[in-house]
Amino acid sequence: MVTKLLPTLIFLAAIGSGIVGGVFFAFSNFVMPALARLPAAGGIAAMNSISITVITPMFMTALFGTGLVCLLLIAGAIIGWSQPGSFWLLAGALIYLVGNPIVTMVFNVPLNDALAAVDPASSNGAAVWTDYLRDWVMWNHVRTVTAIAAMASFWFAAR
């Protein structure tokens, strides 16, 4: 059954990876630099607000739904390993899963939780904000690059 759905699943994974990569690209390139220009208390407040409002059905479907599709694609790649494009299919699915849902849950979400726990007006808040910007953006770059690499892999798999 997975093999019959493979073209549709590849398409969905490519689109989902592209959407997620685009969101993370925007954050890395202009959202976070804009927040970094604000005083620490303002940057913390804005980022805490973003961390809450990003939890929407659309974005969660893009981020984690694409991850679920990738799990199906791993099965499809293994079942049809002798078929052309299977390597790219497996590579794209693994790159996406590790670089996006896993990095998000292991690194970005805990950083968001730590930022939410700090008093934005305190001197500790300013120190946490400085470290947060460095670490969160670095992991966001990882998410951006891996989502785009996964999308490219899905394109190669579909050829």
Image (cartoon, rainbow, N blue to C red):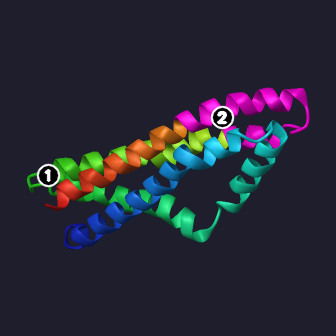
Task: Examine the structure image and report whether residue 74 is included in the region drawn in magenta.
Answer: no
Taking 29 as reference, is 8 left or right? left
Q: Quadrant of the C terminus?
A: bottom left
**Could you tell me residue 73's position as x and y percent?**
29, 58
Q: Secondary structure at mark 1?
A: loop
User: Going 66% across and 34% down the picture, which residue do you hit?
Assistant: 133
Up-down relation of residue 4 to residue 22 (above or below) = below
Q: Nearer the viewer, residue 122 or 68?
A: 122
Up-down relation of residue 31 to residue 4 (above or below) = above
Disc 1 residue type? Answer: Trp
Determine whether label 1 and label 2 are within 8 Å by CB.
no
Quickly name the residue at label 2: 133
- Residue 81, numbered circle: 1
Q: Quadrant of the N terminus?
A: bottom left
**Could you tell me residue 28's position as x and y percent?**
53, 44
Residue 80 visible somewhere in the drawing: yes
User: Going 69% across and 28% down the picture, which residue do you hit?
Assistant: 131
